[in-house]
């Protein structure tokens, strides 16, 4: 990571270390909250919002943690902690309690993916059953397609 590239983090909105004054830890970025059954749609929404905020590099490690003596260590920690809060506020309380002690957004993201992206064989069977019995009936094409 070249410091010359990111040193303007206080004034450059395209800098991944830039945080706008309204980007605070109390924001809930996506709804519905992650509940364990909606991981894929939740993760997609979360990735989209973090990409729009130029923060996806904190999840995929393309913005690595600088050394403590690096001038960007403080801004990196501030952004990482903000993203940790955003993730914690975007999950149901029972999940939030289990992710409280993660130090980096990338480790937390990986943990959530490992836990919730796996197929649930019973849920898959339920969905296949629902799909088998799905009929358009009085639904519009749009409603039917959404179902």
Image: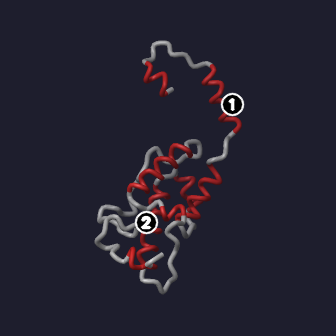
Residue at the image position 50 percent from the left and 47 percent from the top: 44
Labelled disc at residue 125: 1
Compared with residue 4, is residue 49 higher up or lower down, i.e. above or below?
A: above
The percent coordinates of residue 13 (x first, y second) are 31, 65
**Is residue 41 toward the left or the right of residue 118 in the image?**
left
Residue placed furthest toward the right: 121
Relative to 127, is 104 above or below? below
- Residue drawn 69% across the image and 31% down it: 125
Q: Which residue is mark 2?
A: 82
Image disc number at residue 21:
none
Residue name at image x 57 percent, y 53 percent: 94
Q: Quadrant of residue 16?
A: bottom left
Tell me if 19 is positioned left or right of 106 in this view. Answer: left
Q: Residues within 10 Å of mark 2 (few under 14, many from 20)?
A: some
Single out the residue that lies furthest toward the top.
Answer: 137
Total numbered badges shown on the rendered structure: 2
Position of 82 relative to 130 (above/below): below
Mark 1 neighbour density, 10 Å: few (under 14) some (14–19) many (20 or more): few
Q: Earlier in the sequence, mark 1 or mark 2?
A: 2
Give the image location of residue 38, x and y in percent: 55, 42
Residue 29 rendering spot, x and y as whole percentages: 41, 52
- Nearest the viewer among 31 and 95 is 31
Spatial CA distance of label 1 from label 2 is 38 Å
Left or right of 38: which side holds 80?
A: left
As helix, strand or loop, the secondary structure at mark 1 comes to helix
- State the residue at coordinates (54%, 57%): 96
| Label 2: which secondary element | helix
The extreme bottom residue here reads 69
Mark 1 touching mark 2, by CB under 8 A? no
């Amino acid at each position: 990571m070249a410091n010359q590239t990111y040193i303007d983090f206080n004034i450059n909105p395209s800098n991944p270390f830039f945080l706008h004054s309204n980007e605070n830890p109390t924001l809930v970025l996506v709804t519905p909250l992650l509940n364990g059954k909606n991981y894929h749609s939740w993760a997609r929404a979360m990735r989209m919002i973090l990409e729009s905020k130029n923060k996806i590099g904190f999840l995929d490690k393309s913005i690595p943690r600088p050394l403590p003596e690096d001038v960007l260590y403080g801004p990196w920690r501030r952004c990482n902690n903000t993203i940790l809060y955003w993730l914690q506020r975007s999950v149901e309380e029972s999940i939030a309690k289990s992710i409280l002690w993660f130090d980096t957004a990338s480790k937390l993201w990986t943990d959530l993916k490992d836990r919730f992206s796996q197929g649930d064989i019973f849920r898959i069977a339920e969905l296949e059953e629902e799909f088998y019995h799905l009929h358009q009936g009085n639904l519009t094409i749009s409603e039917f397609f959404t179902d």
